[in-house]
Amino acid sequence: MGHPKNLIQQQFGGHADKYATSTVHARGESLARLLELTKPQAHWLALDVSTGAGHTALTFAPHVAQVTAVDLTPEMLQTASRLANERGITNIEFKSADAHALPFDDNTFDLITNRIALHHYSDARQAIAEMVRVCKSEGWVGFTDNVVPPEKVTAGHINHWEQMRDPSHHWEYPVARLEAMFTEAGVTIEHTQELEKEMEFEPWADRMGASTELKAQLRQWLANAPQAVQAWLKPRRDGERLFFTLHEVVLVGRKKQGK
């Protein structure tokens, strides 16, 4: 297996445009909740870490003074920049950066956002520490990611399935583990909310360029998955179409004073 950074760039570089049109990423319920809960202010400087196709940065930009949007994958930044231009949004600066080593000074931003990205990081704890480091004292952190159940065997099965589809997938965590990592990094958690989002199998697989053979393997795996996995993913058919459910957490907190 290649280096995690190279895997991420390979997986997302070739599929950036699919993320531009992904309704899950552009209009997910978690994005609206992040906006409501962080209550962005017109004078704020915001940082969107692992911006992908830029949907979170584009959503927050009208509400703040400036957004800096960073991503590891150049093609994603190009796609995000194109979307910003198409929408006439001019207060976003796009930069290449690794979430594990953000190129910003301590206490720089009023708001840090990170959405549907942490499961790609080889060291989630380090990336969270970096986000908190560059956040101002008493600034806001708005986070979402897919989550797994606390039961380790079931969590392992679900992460394996995700890794089959996307080799750059590292690990999804249970909610309690994520809360603990943010707390340890110096965040006072103000709000945690779990959401469910129904996914259609074909677009989900296509976003990572899955071959016909791999799609068949992914379908077979889901059909044969243990009962606890089935109960979590809730697969259902509608004619030829296959759907399943992912679970997501919205976690919003403030950096502790003096951290």
Image (cartoon, rainbow, N blue to C red):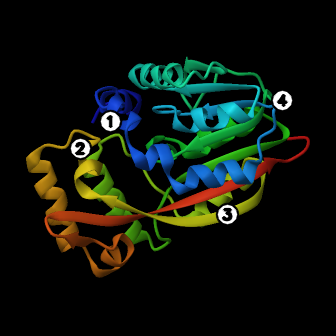
Marks 4 & 1, CB-CB < 8 Å contact? no
Q: Alpha-carbon distance for marks 4 and 3?
A: 26 Å
Q: Alpha-carbon distance for marks 1 and 2?
A: 8 Å
Asked if residue 139 shows in the view, the reply is: yes
Q: Earlier in the sequence, mark 2 or mark 4?
A: 4
Quarter occupied by residue 230: bottom left
Marks 1 & 2, CB-CB < 8 Å contact? yes
Relative to 253, does residue 233 appear above or below in the rendering? Answer: below
Residue 13, x across and y down, in percent:
33, 26
Disc 3 designates what residue? 192
Q: Alpha-carbon distance for marks 4 and 1?
A: 33 Å
Mark 2 crowdedness (10 Å alpha carbons): few <14, some 14-19, many ≥20:
some
Asked if residue 170 shows in the view, the reply is: no
- Label 1 residue SS: helix
Q: Which of marks 4 and 1 is nearer the N terminus?
A: 1
- Label 4 residue SS: loop
- Label 3 residue SS: strand
Q: Earlier in the sequence, mark 2 or mark 3?
A: 3
Of circles 2 and 3, the one toward us is 2
Disc 2 designates what residue? 206
Q: Alpha-carbon distance for marks 3 and 1?
A: 29 Å
